[in-house]
Image: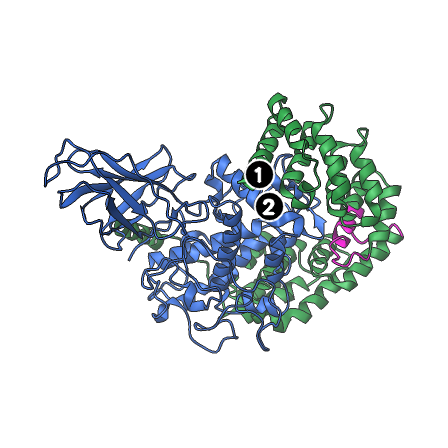
């Protein structure tokens, strides 16, 4: 993939062996580890290793000292910098770039909690420490999953547009996501044991990557189902259900053409309105599940019943209230994004990211697909019984921003999503869950 | 931000969170059996019943007993039914109760209690229960459905196999108001009703809401004819702006339709976007323009 290089103009080389502070003269190339087809790059809170080097430096100098920092637009993303992988980055870092053109690494990550709203609302800047001359700059986006209730109208509309395109009136790639989350044996894969959370993490990530293939600035928003969500349950976003289970959308909402299965529209009861706070475990109560005497996944996974099942049922009726039909309703993806966020937040607050640690998952006699080394269906493809022998989705979508997880992920691949111990990350993060090692 | 300080502060908040109510299945069963019970308190207890792995079986047993107890208040039984439906999201654990649950719902579909009937059909029709479908179909045929006519059509329309489509066609032609609207919705995938959809979508004398449903049905059943109707709607200044916005949105987000739109449509539509005073239409056209630009890039 061609790197996206941003450079400022080349100036004549200085005549001195040590650079004069009054003679700006060099350019710096800034190279991120990954770019998409539009030569754009995206980061999360998790820093990535960026390489800097002098380009065509003037003769006679040994090196240039530079300060690397961020330039942010109002309400844009922000960045932190460090010379190692850490959560303790600073707003700027000073580096020495050799005149030989040798690359020098710097770790760049989003500065929690300042996420981007659009591409290019934050940029890396490299300046000469002596002159403050701008030597290089590079646009990017701190791309983070956000609370749907706090999205700007522009963010919301981009998400809805990508979602409607993926849906393709029920016939697009969306239909495979709908069909892999259905009753019978596939449902056992998704909900039949402790693999419930890892399975849905892959599912959501696969889905989000498909959305990003349509619009790379989009992330999955989440519905915090323990709070009222006035901006989600209105006609401009996830719609408002009427007494006949018909979800009403505003005329311009791209979801007006949504087809979950067969019939157009969304079948949902009016259990959750703009001011409804569903009766289920709060975020704090959920994160405390199984926390004593020490936090363990074995206790936390009880959240599959409450709040997860309770959140589905808070709507009262309609597709969202049954595992077989739930993904026909677009709110399903926001609901499950919150389920995954809760797991991510539990992992952070109790510092349990390492799949080698017993607390990060469970051991025991569970069904295939629910043990730590098990590959997850359907991404692992058709298998012999007792795994389902159909696989509508096959391998998961790739991301231009990372090589992880593999196209056929196992449960253990889905635990350290931030790459705190593995070195590879999944290129997603939540607006209230920082990176920490 | 000092992330570790933030984490410690958050942990301190968690420590102060109210404990989860520890309601045991036996306590709920005993309270429900008590002649002195308060319905709201019973509903609260049912809602707090844990579905964690350690007490899942006992909880589900208690919930099934409450739902099936005809002498209990409807509110308590519905609360228990909601919990059972939540328990279904743990299918491996729920498997041993599944057959009993479905049998209970089929009994409740003929309950004298309307609330229980509606709730039973609501759940059964989500998974194409043929017993429930037959009750609804037979009831609609004789004009005495077990739930309201609108609800009955809505539930029956969930049938993935579309076996009630001929009935819906008759209702769409022979009824008025909400029943006609519901029947029209239920016909959304019926290719034999294309002419009906086209006629309603084009008829300015029909309610806008009905025309919108007909237009969406047409999109599903005949993208070619929909493309013609939608482009005409979108460019017609005399049309309802909301309906025009829906038409534009459908063209934008359905590649099959977009492919059938004439090349000169885009320029005409962009001119509408400049001229219109309708925010919703303008926004819809703006999204169309962006989608076209993205496709070109």
Dot 2 falls on a residue whose secondary structure is helix
The residue sitting at 68% across, 64% down in the picture is B68
Q: Tag 2: Cα neighbours inside 10 Å, few (<14), some, or many (≥20)?
A: many
Question: Do the residues bearing badges 2 and 1 touch, measured as CB atoms within 8 Å?
Answer: yes
The colour scheme used to paint the residues is: by chain
Quadrant in the rendering for residue A21: top left
Q: Is residue B186 magenta?
A: no
Q: Which residues are magenta?
A: B142-163
Q: Tag 1: Cα neighbours inside 10 Å, few (<14), some, or many (≥20)?
A: some
Nearer to us in this view, B59 or A436: A436
Rendered hue of chain A is blue
In this rendering, the answer to whether B106 lies above or below B169 is below
Residue A267 seen: no
Q: Is residue B160 magenta?
A: yes
Q: Which mark is residue B291?
A: 1
Provide the letter of the chain coloured green: B
Read off the chain for label 2: A
Instruction: Please name which of the two marks, 2 or 1, marks the residue nearer to the observer.
Output: 1
| Magenta span: chief secondary structure | loop
Nearer to us in this view, A226 or A68: A68
Nearer to us in this view, B235 or A86: B235
Quadrant in the rendering for residue B283: top right
In this rendering, the answer to whether B7 lies above or below A141 is below
Residue B128 percent across, percent down from the top left? 73, 61
Q: Describe residue A339's horizontal placement relative to residue B204 as left or right.
A: left
Give the quadrant of the C terminus of chain A: bottom left
Residue B28 percent across, percent down from the top left? 56, 63
**Residue position for label 2:** A165
C-alpha separation, residue under disc 2 versus residue under disc 1: 10 Å
Residue B79 percent across, percent down from the top left? 61, 56
Read off the chain for label 1: B
């Amino acid at each position: 993939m061609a790197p996206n290089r941003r450079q400022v103009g080349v100036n004549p080389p200085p005549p001195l062996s040590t650079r004069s502070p009054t003679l700006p003269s060099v350019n710096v190339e800034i190279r991120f580890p990954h770019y998409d087809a539009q030569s754009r790059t995206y980061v999360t809170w998790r820093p990535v290793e960026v390489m800097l080097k002098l380009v065509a430096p003037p003769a006679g100098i040994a090196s240039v000292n530079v300060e690397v920092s961020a330039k942010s637009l109002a309400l844009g993303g922000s960045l932190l910098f460090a010379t190692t992988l850490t959560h303790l980055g600073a707003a700027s870092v000073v580096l020495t770039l050799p005149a030989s053109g040798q690359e020098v690494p710097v770790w760049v990550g989003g500065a929690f909690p300042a996420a981007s709203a659009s591409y290019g609302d934050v940029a890396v800047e490299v300046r000469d420490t002596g002159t403050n001359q701008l030597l290089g700059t590079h646009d990017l986006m701190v791309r983070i999953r956000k609370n749907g209730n706090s999205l700007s109208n522009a963010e919301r509309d981009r998400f809805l547009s990508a979602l409607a395109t993926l849906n393709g009136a029920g016939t697009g790639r969306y239909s495979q996501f709908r069909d892999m989350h259905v009753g019978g044996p596939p449902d056992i894969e998704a909900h039949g044991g402790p693999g419930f959370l890892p399975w849905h993490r892959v599912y959501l990530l696969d889905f989000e990557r498909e959305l990003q293939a349509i619009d790379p600035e989009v992330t999955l928003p989440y519905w915090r189902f323990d709070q009222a969500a006035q901006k989600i349950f209105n006609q401009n976003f996830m719609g408002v259900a009427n007494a006949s289970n018909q979800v009403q959308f505003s005329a311009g909402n791209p979801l007006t053409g949504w087809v979950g299965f067969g019939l157009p529209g969304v079948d949902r009861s009016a259990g959750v309105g703009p001011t409804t706070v569903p009766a289920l475990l709060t975020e704090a109560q959920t994160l405390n599940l199984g926390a004593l005497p020490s936090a363990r996944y074995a206790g936390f996974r009880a959240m599959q019943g409450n709040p997860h099942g309770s959140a589905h049922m808070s709507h009262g009726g309609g597709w969202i209230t049954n595992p077989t039909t739930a993904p026909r309703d677009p709110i399903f993806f926001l609901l499950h994004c919150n389920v995954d966020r809760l797991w991510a937040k539990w992992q952070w607050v109790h510092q349990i990211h390492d799949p080698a640690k017993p607390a990060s998952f469970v051991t025991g006699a569970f069904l295939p697909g629910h043990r730590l080394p098990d590959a997850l269906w359907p991404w692992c493809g058709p298998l012999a019984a007792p795994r389902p022998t159909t696989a509508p989705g096959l391998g998961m979508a790739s991301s231009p921003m990372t090589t992880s997880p593999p196209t056929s992920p196992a449960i253990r691949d889905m635990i350290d999503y931030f790459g705190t111990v593995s070195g590879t990350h999944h290129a997603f993060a939540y607006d209230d869950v920082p990176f920490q090692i | 931000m000092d992330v570790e300080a933030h984490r410690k502060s958050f942990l301190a908040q968690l420590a102060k969170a109210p404990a989860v109510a520890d309601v045991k299945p036996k306590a709920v069963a005993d309270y429900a059996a008590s002649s002195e019970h308060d319905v709201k308190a019973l509903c609260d207890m049912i809602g707090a019943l844990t579905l964690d792995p350690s007490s899942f079986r006992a909880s589900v047993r208690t919930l099934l007993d409450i739902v099936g107890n005809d002498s209990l208040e409807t509110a308590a039984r519905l609360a228990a039914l909601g919990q059972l439906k939540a328990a279904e999201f743990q299918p491996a654990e729920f498997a041993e109760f599944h057959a009993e649950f479905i049998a209970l719902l089929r009994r409740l579909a003929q309950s004298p209690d309307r609330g229980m009937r509606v709730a039973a059909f609501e759940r059964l029709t989500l998974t194409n229960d043929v017993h429930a479908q037959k009750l609804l179909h037979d009831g609609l045929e004789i004009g005495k459905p077990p739930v309201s006519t609108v609800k009955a059509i809505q539930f029956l329309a969930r049938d993935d196999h579309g076996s009630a489509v001929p009935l819906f066609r008759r209702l769409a032609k022979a009824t008025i108001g909400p029943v006609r609207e519901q029947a029209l919705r239920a016909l959304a995938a019926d290719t034999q009703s294309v002419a009906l959809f086209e006629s309603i979508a084009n008829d300015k004398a029909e309610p806008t809401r009905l025309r919108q449903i007909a237009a969406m049905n047409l999109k599903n059943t005949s993208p070619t004819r929909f493309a013609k109707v939608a482009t005409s709607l979108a460019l017609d200044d005399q049309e309802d702006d909301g309906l025009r916005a829906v038409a534009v949105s459908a063209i934008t987000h359905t590649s099959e339709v977009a492919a059938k739109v004439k090349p000169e449509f885009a320029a005409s539509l962009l001119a509408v976007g400049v001229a219109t005073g309708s925010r919703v239409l303008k926004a819809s056209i703006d999204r169309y323009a962006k989608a076209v630009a993205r496709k070109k890039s």
